[in-house]
Amino acid sequence: RAKSEGKATYQFFEPKLDEEARLRRQTELDLRRALHEGGFELHFQPLYSLVEDRLKGFEALVRWNHPERGLVNPVDFIPLAEETGLIIPLGEWILREACWQASQWPEELSVAINISPKQFASGNLAQTILQALSHSGLAPGRLELEITESIFIANVEKTLSTLHGLRDLGVRIALDDFGTGYSSLSYLRSFPFDKVKIDRSFVQDLTTEGNAHAVIRAITTLADALGMETLAEGVEDAGQLEVLRREGCRYIQGFLYSHPLNVSEVGILIDSNGMQRVTRPA
Ligand code: C2E
Ligand code: MG
Ligand code: MG
Ligand code: MG
């Protein structure tokens, strides 16, 4: 469309594009520097078991501790890290750090780590995971990898063989943001995921929309039949919790139970749950 409006249009937009490109390059440089200077930190959001009525583990969520901008959320830098390939070294750091932190927790607690599509396809993910496990001493069964449906877009055969390879390490695999993808049901059938994380959008609708209950019920029924656990993301109020409980959802995560916590807050929560903490020399 810009073309038919003539050359003037291009001239009008060019300075803005330049400015955007400059900003992206600057952010990329900042990210590189942060990687070398320890500028990232992990926060951990509690995962709660409705069936056992107890804290089950935590999901690791990365933050960028930016010198001027403060704590930056992943939506504002993960996409650029993906595009520039920086997600590979950043993802390695996240895996090492999250496994290390989890190795300090009571043994009944697990850790879930988000794996981005590029990291998943990189070819050395299994190696990185093995190193993180052996360095921390964390039992593989306490580590859950969260992947999204987008990993299937590339090459289904290759994706499935990578998934089976990871599973062979003894780690668990969760399908994150379930229901937002292009062909959610077919992906669910293609691999025996340990857990399905029902996307926040379905949970949000629970209070306002009558048919949202039916969607939750359909997902939990299907997951049960396939031998997969279900977790509902983004649970914010007691009304949503009530429905999720009734529809047989096993785990919840969300602001109702807890926001993501920094490392010292994690320690306090564990202590207040009366769980035995493990301390290892760093
Ligand atoms: P996600 O994996 O679906 O993570 C859940 C996100 O929902 C987190 O946002 C969490 O803070 C937010 N959340 C949790 N409970 C509630 C709630 O009750 N209400 C609302 N409104 N939000 C809630 P966060 O930390 O900003 O992360 C956003 C996304 O960034 C994550 O979505 C994940 O896709 C990605 N991400 C986060 N950490 C990492 C990481 O270490 N590696 C990679 N590759 N991606 C990450
Ligand atoms: Mg996740
Ligand atoms: Mg999620
Ligand atoms: Mg989500």
Image (tube, rainbow, N blue to C red):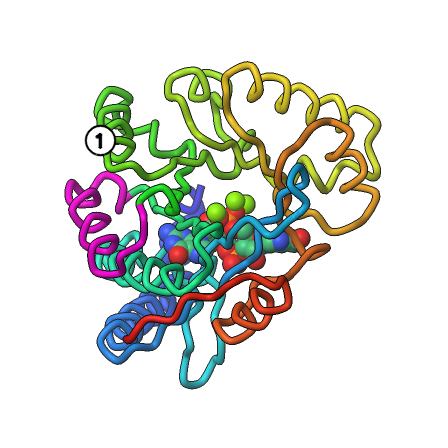
Residue at point 46%, 21% (across, down): 188
Q: Is residue 246 above or below residue 274?
A: above
* Location of residue 26 in the rendering, given as x and y in whole percent from the top left corner: 30, 74
Residue at image mark 1: 165
Q: Is residue 157 above or below residue 10?
A: above
Visible residue check, residue 9: no
**Which secondary structure class fits the magenta region best?**
helix
Dot 1 alpha-carbon crowd within 10 angstroms: few under 14, some 14 to 19, many 20 or more? few
Please state the extent of the stretch shown in magenta in the rendering. 118-139
* Location of residue 227 in the rendering, given as x and y in whole percent from the top left corner: 50, 20
Visible residue check, residue 67: yes
| Front residue of this view, candidates 36 and 81 | 36
Residue at point 56%, 29% (across, down): 179
Residue at point 23%, 39% (across, down): 121
Q: Is residue 60 above or below residue 235?
A: below
Placement of the N terminus among the 4 image quadrants: top left
Residue at point 63%, 62% (across, down): 273
| Front residue of this view, candidates 20 and 126 | 126
* Location of residue 170 in the rendering, given as x and y in whole percent from the top left corner: 29, 36
Please identify the quarter of the rendering in which residue 100 is found: bottom left
Ligand 4, what quadrant? top right
| Front residue of this view, candidates 16 and 20 | 20
Whether residue 13 sits left or right of residue 124 in the image: it is: right
Mark 1 vs ligand 1: CB below 8 Å: no
User: What secondary structure is found at the residue carrying circle 1?
Assistant: helix
Placement of the C terminus among the 4 image quadrants: bottom left
